Structures are given as C-alpha cells and as structure tokens.
Image: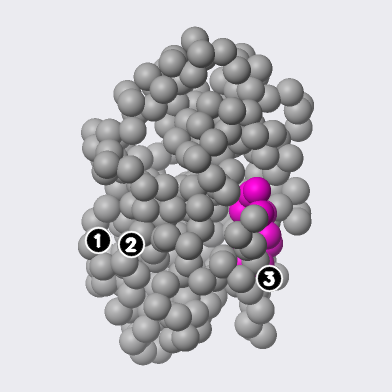
Amino acid sequence: MTQELKDFLDSKVEQYNTPAFIKDDPVCIPHLFTKKQDIEIAALFASIFAWGNRAIIIKKSKDLLQRMDNAPYDFILNHTDNDLKKLLGFKHRTFNDTDLLYFVHFLNHHYTLNRSLETAFLLGINENDETIDGGLNYFFRYFFSLEDAPARTKKHIASPGKKSTCKRLNMFLRWMVRSDKKGVDFGIWKKISPAQLVCPIDVHVARVAYRFNLLQRNQIDWTAGVELTSNLRLLDKADPVKYDFALFGLGVVEKF
C-alpha cells in the first residue's frame, strides 16, 4: 500500500467520521439514547433494518422505538402481552412482526441473564483470533437457540458460516466496538478488539475497493470482506475498519 493511498483514505476518514455524518445515517438511531442497553438494542434494530434508502431506515427505526415507548431496554425486560400488541403490523421490507416478536423474545431472554449484548458475541471469540467470524457464527447459533425460533427469521441474521458478507452486523459491531473522539461510533464494548472487526462490504464499497486494488475477489461475500480488511490493516493495523467511513463516503455519497 502506498503512502499516497493511505494519506488519501485518511483524509476521507477525517471528512466523513464527524458528528455531521450522524443525522443522515442509521447510526443516528442509537444516538437518541444514553443508557448502554438502550444504545445496544436501538443499534441492533437500526443495523438489521439497514438496507435500502437511509431516510426510510431511520423512519422505520423511529417507528419501532415509538412502539416501545422510546425506552427499548425497559420494554424488552418488562413488557406485558398487551404491550406486545403495539408491535403487531410492523413491517420493514421483508422484516415483519413475526420476526420482531422473536427478536424481542430473544433479547428478553438474553438481558434477563446478561447486562450487555456484547456477551452474545464473546463466547465465539478467542483473544488471538484475527477476525470476528467466530463471534458472528456463535451469535447466529445463540440467537436461534430458543425453541420457538421461526425459520423465516433466519434470513435476518447473517453469519460467515453461510458465506454472507454480514455487512449489517459488521456495521453494528463497528458502532459498538470502535472508539475515537469523533463522536460517531460508541466504543462501549471493551472486550472485542477493533483490530478484529471486518469492514462492512457491499457493491458500493467493493466498487471503490477494486479501484484502489484493495480487493481482488469477484464474489462479494464474507471472504471478500476479510480480504478487504486484510489490506486495510496494512494502512492501520489497530483500527482497519475506520476506513469504512472513507469507502462508504466515496462509494455512496460521492458515487466515486
């Protein structure tokens, strides 16, 4: 990797990793909250909904949170059957109220036993793992370990084991794990290293990555995300996924 490329991408990270980025991006949803668990739950839903138009993703996320009285952690832990009726009829693209009710059921199960959603990933990760794939595979198995898990809901939680890019969960993990003073990412999870994260990848990010020879693989899948991240580690070993800001900004905002 040339110093020239690093300097250019670093400048794009500086340009997009700012508080001004927040309001038009799904990351604005967890920024509505200050309690750790509220941030985690809001971020999970916002990331799961994050495909398609960003304004619609934000609108649908706010709709869901209003149905939870804008107190998602309290709702998850203390809802009654009557409260759940407020969730009926919710729909975003292929995500419907059947999926939503199972998400609430899983989160209730998890938070009854754990203080943070971080532990839902941790048991699949070893300290010396280069990437987060073990944590994502563990999360998928754990998420669907409850006996009434609907088969249709499995398409909403990706895993490397299914060769998925895991774009949305990688974005969620970036929000939770990355820590800097810019104010976009939260950095509230301390047991997963930013160095283990994998860059979220889609057709827009891949297009930019190809232009800079950061990616050779034709198929956009988990392996492509790992390849891209390996090359980004040559630019910043400790925090490769910060370049998601640059690649996203160039690909989606600037149509580079």
Where on the picture, by quarter, is residue 211? Answer: top right
Taking the magenta stretch, the answer to whether it contains residue 167 is no
- The dot on residue 141 is 3
Q: Earlier in the sequence, mark 1 or mark 3?
A: 1
Q: Residue at x 33, y 33 (%)?
A: 17
In the rendered image, residue 90, in percent from the top left (x then y), is placed at 43, 64
Q: Residue at x 61, y 71 (%)?
A: 123
Dominant SS of magenta comes to helix
**Mark 1 sits on what residue?**
33
Is disc 3 placed on a helix, strand or loop? helix
Read off the magenta span: 129-139
In this view, which residue lies farthest toward the top?
4
Above or below, comparing residue 108 to residue 244 in the picture: below
The CA distance from mark 2 to mark 3 is: 23 Å
**Mark 2 sits on what residue?**
39
In the rendered image, residue 111, in percent from the top left (x then y), is placed at 43, 80
Q: Is residue 170 visible?
A: yes
Where on the picture, by quarter, is residue 24? Answer: top left
In the rendered image, residue 53, in percent from the top left (x then y), is placed at 43, 38
Name the quarter where the N terminus is drawn. Answer: top right
Amino acid type for the residue under numbered disc 1: Phe
